Image: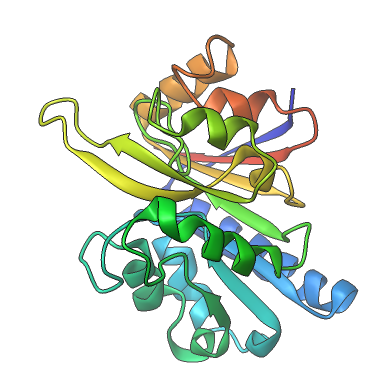
């Protein structure tokens, strides 16, 4: 099983304060140790306040590489694009000087674009200094969705990224093409910060941690990995 440290907070503000401090320190340490730091970022509301806080810090941003954990195969300006979200939160103010590596390229499909994305990500320093993950109520993390097309590649390949077809809604059955970090890539991180909010998602996390089929709850693959260091951040 992964090394798991659970950090519980009374409020989202307290979580944000701790997350912001530890992210800043990890980036400073990475630059001091290796000359560059790598921050792998997720979308979602939980990390947004910390991203905005970081963007205002006078870090040596020219030595910081920022790359995506996952992305929908949509235009970079699309309202559901994680890239658009990161550009509007983290890559502002001082943070605009960071070196951003997009997951999206000019290929027609995520599958076709995976080789170009893989080549770009292979140039990043490893281990990554920090990888930020969220978790869905179905037990997905990154874009490793339960029983999604391409899930087995995401869990078993040695590549850093892969294409995946995810059912975003059981109600509508809508399938979206995505690009995602693989389990192997997540494992190449000094620390993984898993952000969880609310009692419902915490119950899902506990169910994943208790064990079971990784295809049903892909988060289990991360929690079960023997070399991953995970810090779980939870607030109500």
> Is 165 placed above or below 160 here?
above
Q: Quadrant of residue 52?
A: bottom left
Left or right relative to 37: residue 73:
left
The residue depicted at 32 percent of the width and 71 percent of the height is: 84
> Residue 213's spot in the image, x, y percent?
53, 11
The residue depicted at 44 percent of the width and 27 percent of the height is: 202
Left or right relative to 122: residue 206:
left
> Is 81 placed above or below 197 here?
below
Left or right relative to 182: residue 142:
left
Left or right relative to 101: residue 61:
right
The residue depicted at 71 percent of the width and 84 percent of the height is: 63
Q: Quadrant of residue 201?
A: top left
* Residue nearest the observer in this picture, 236 or 86: 86
Instruction: Tell me how many marks there are.
Output: 0
The chosen color scheme is rainbow
The quarter in which the C terminus is drawn is top left
> Is 148 placed above or below 179 here?
above
Q: Quadrant of residue 129?
A: bottom right
The residue depicted at 55 percent of the width and 9 percent of the height is: 212
> Residue 36's spot in the image, x, y percent?
77, 77
Q: Residue furthest right?
A: 33
Q: Can residue 198 be seen from the camera position used here?
A: yes
The quarter in which the N terminus is drawn is top right
> Residue 4's spot in the image, x, y percent?
71, 32
* Residue nearest the observer in this picture, 112 or 86: 112
* Residue nearest the observer in this picture, 154 or 135: 154
> Residue 156's spot in the image, x, y percent?
64, 31
């Amino acid at each position: 099983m992964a090394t798991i440290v659970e950090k519980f907070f009374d409020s989202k503000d307290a979580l944000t304060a701790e997350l912001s401090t530890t992210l800043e320190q990890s980036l400073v340490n990475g630059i001091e140790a290796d000359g560059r730091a790598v921050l792998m970022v997720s979308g979602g509301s939980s990390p947004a306040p910390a991203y905005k806080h970081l963007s205002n810090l006078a870090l040596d941003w020219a030595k910081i590489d920022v790359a995506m954990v996952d992305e929908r195969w949509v235009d970079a300006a699309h309202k559901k694009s994680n890239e658009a979200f990161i550009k509007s939160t983290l890559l502002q103010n001082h943070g605009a000087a960071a070196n951003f590596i997009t997951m999206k390229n000019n290929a027609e499909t995520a599958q076709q674009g995976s080789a170009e994305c893989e080549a770009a990500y292979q140039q990043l320093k490893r281990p990554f200094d920090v990888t930020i993950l969220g978790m869905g109520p179905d037990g997905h993390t990154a874009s490793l969705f339960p029983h999604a097309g391409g899930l087995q590649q995401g869990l078993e390949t040695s590549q850093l990224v892969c294409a995946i077809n995810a059912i975003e809604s059981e109600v509508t059955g809508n399938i979206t093409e995505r690009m995602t970090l693989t389990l192997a890539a997540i494992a190449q991180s000094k620390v993984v910060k898993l952000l969880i909010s609310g009692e419902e998602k915490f119950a899902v996390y506990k169910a994943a941690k208790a064990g079971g089929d990784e295809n049903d709850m892909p988060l289990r693959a991360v929690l079960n990995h023997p070399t991953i260091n995970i810090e779980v951040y939870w607030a109500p």
